[in-house]
Amino acid sequence: MALIPRRPRPPALLRPPVDLVQPLGRRFDWRGPRAPLRLIGLLAVVGVFVLPFLNASTYLMQILTSAYIYVMLAMGLNVVVGYAGLLDLGYIAFFAVGAYTSGIATTRLGLSQVQAIPLVIVVCVLAGIVIGGPTLRLRSDYLAIVTLGFGEIIRVTANNLSVTGGPAGIYAIPGWQFFGWRLRDGFSLGGLRFNGQVTFYYFVALIVTVLGVLGISQIARGRLGRAWKAVRDDEDAAEAMGINTYLAKITAYIIGAVWAGLAGQLMATQQSAISPPSFQFLHSALILMAVVLGGMGSTPGVIVGALFISLAPEFLRGVADWRYLIFGLLLILVMIFRPAGLWPASAVLPWSRDRRRAAETAPPPPPESPSSPAAAADRGPTADGPTSAPASPEREVRP
Amino acid sequence: MIQVIVNGLSVGAFYALVALGYSMVYGIIKLLNFAHGDIYMLGAYVGFVVLGALTSWLSLPTALGLVLVTLVTMALTGGAGVLLERVAYRPIRHAPRLSLLITAVGLSFALEYGVRQIFGPQPSHFPVQIDAGSVHLFGATITIARIVVILVAAGLMVVLALFVAKTRQGRAMRAIALDAKAARLMGIDVDRTISLVFFIGSALAGAAGVLAGAVYGTIDFLMGFIIGIKAFTAAVIGGIGNLYGAMLGGVALGLLESFGVAWLGGQWRDVFSFLCLILFLTFRPTGILGGRVQERM
């Protein structure tokens, strides 16, 4: 996979087996400007694993399971929209493909949910290739509307075929079982009895989602992720640098499809029934909002955005009817006033002393040209960032 | 056969009217205005309200009333289009393409659910319907409503074509579509012309909305969604950015769909047209009448 030309490499013994993803060892840097945020993230992950031991009410577990499925979807869409810069408006179609594949495989072909996982992945990869293949060569705005049409095609097809159960959908989808032990039997741990029905879907969804989030953020730091970002920022320049832009885009598309498919399987097992109305454009738009509001290309932002979008109806009971209108307006406002989202990829805590250092590494500062003192002097009053330090003698000449 | 063709033509007339707005906006600022289908929906609701107000104040003959309502609605939806462009698109016109597209999606969402908050999720019944009977022609039953739709759409398109071809403003539009920067240097007020394009496109979509209400009888807040994609399909088939392409594409899509329904059955209608879209984009992305495509750097 020649996405980016390879660098000279270390001797084979020192080389990590896969350099598509960044090695895990460099992940936790406790001293940098973003360390406090990392700590908060780690605490949050521990917190959600501990939560069922404190309060395992059916209601809480159910809304949180749905929220995790949303996080999984949003992480997948983030690859397509946030990293690769392709607008996918029919993303829910892959969710439907995953859910229906799992439903058909378990109820009609007699497979177990675990056996259905590879099938779901294969079908989603194929769906990604079929849709992405012809359209990714086109301009990005054509892609948006083709995916929109594709989302409708999948829904209408599911509504009209008999193998998908028509408008009634597929019901009695079996849950997860591992080696003869079924999750819904429940079990006790540390003196607490868990009723499997709900709590365990919580754990399954949580573990899959955590793996999904870690997987995406690892891929995004590696060569593949850098290729995506290069394509997003300037496709022609990326191509000139030797990146196979088509391959990069279709990989993003396929990974997004697989993530959505797995989320679909989670949803099918959680609800044990699926039907076409769950896969309307509305849901594609909601996931897009989660990604955009949180911050495109920012893992914590996307997670927070997905939690916000999926939990908002629970917290805002009084204005539940207004929420879609509010979401739509929010989307416009965010694009006009804060296009990087509420929690951009380069965020640090507002009171952190190292804000400047983080800002320095994130977006490239405007190039300073010491050779032309007039230009530097013109810019003098505004250019007081850390990068302009070498140019300070020339800044004495102010008009 | 004749039946299928006439059905196709009348549906195609709707597609063409909405596709014109898509195509004009795309041609002039290279923006896919996702909210355009919702302007059509807005037109239907504005017509609904204006018609209600008119019939309670003065009693006009149906035909005259409908013409009046269509004109008022066109003015109002045109104004709405200009407002949306001013508020949502103009501030970020030079931002990356993705931001514009996402803004358009947000706008479409806000329009749909804004109308839902006002009029409720149930379909509303249009107070006036064109049901003046039907004529029999070559063994086909053709309702007057369909003929009215085709005639009104054709009339509006002729007026638009003349406007763009003959007037000073039309020439300004064509100049901006060719090269916005050069047009500005030549003293054309680019912002005003873009507003005018949004006004015309939205007014045409509004007219289509009123016609849809008067022909089909019920309107709902999601009616613009499917027709938005269909109109885009029509614009692509004809060659996006090309005025005559949008008209041709609308009619072509209407006919294709009409034959598709006759062969495959009504439930596959949308699937069929979206497949047409994908095929066209794959094999002839410039459409029937599309000329050169220049990638914007």
Image: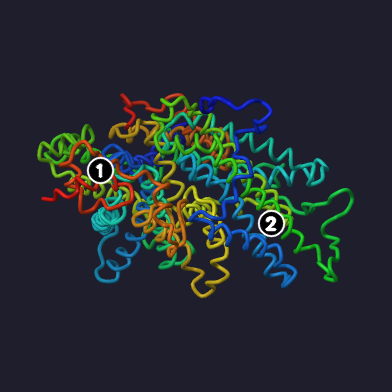
Would residue A277 be visible to someone looking at this image?
no
Q: Nearer the viewer, residue B4 or A329?
A: A329
In the image, what residue occupies the spot 78% across and 47% down? Answer: A113
Chain where mark 2 sits: A
Q: Nearer the viewer, residue B286 or A327?
A: A327
* Residue corresponding to mark 2: A206
Q: Nearer the viewer, residue A164 or B267?
A: A164
Chain where mark 1 sits: B
- Disc 2 residue type? Leu
Left or right of A60, for residue A8: left
Which quarter of the image is occupied by the N terminus of chain A?
top right
**Residue A394 in the image, given as x and y percentages of width and height:** 19, 45
The residue positioned farthest toward the front in the image shown: A393
Left or right of A334, for residue A134: right
**Residue B124 in the image, given as x and y percentages of width and height:** 44, 63
- Disc 1 residue type? Leu
In this picture, is A373 found above or below A318?
above
Q: How much space separates mark 1 and mark 2, taking CA atoms?
A: 57 Å
The secondary structure type at the circle numbered 2 is helix
Callout in the foreground (1, 2): 2
Q: Residues within 10 Å of mark 2 (few under 14, many from 20)?
A: many
In this picture, is A7 found above or below B219?
above
The reply to whether label 1 and label 2 mark residues of one chain is no
* Residue corresponding to mark 1: B156
Q: Nearer the viewer, residue B215 or A130?
A: A130
In the image, what residue occupies the spot 41% across and 33% down? Answer: A139
**Residue B59 in the image, given as x and y percentages of width and height:** 26, 67
**Residue B242 in the image, given as x and y percentages of width and height:** 29, 32
The residue positioned farthest toward the bottom in the image shown: A318
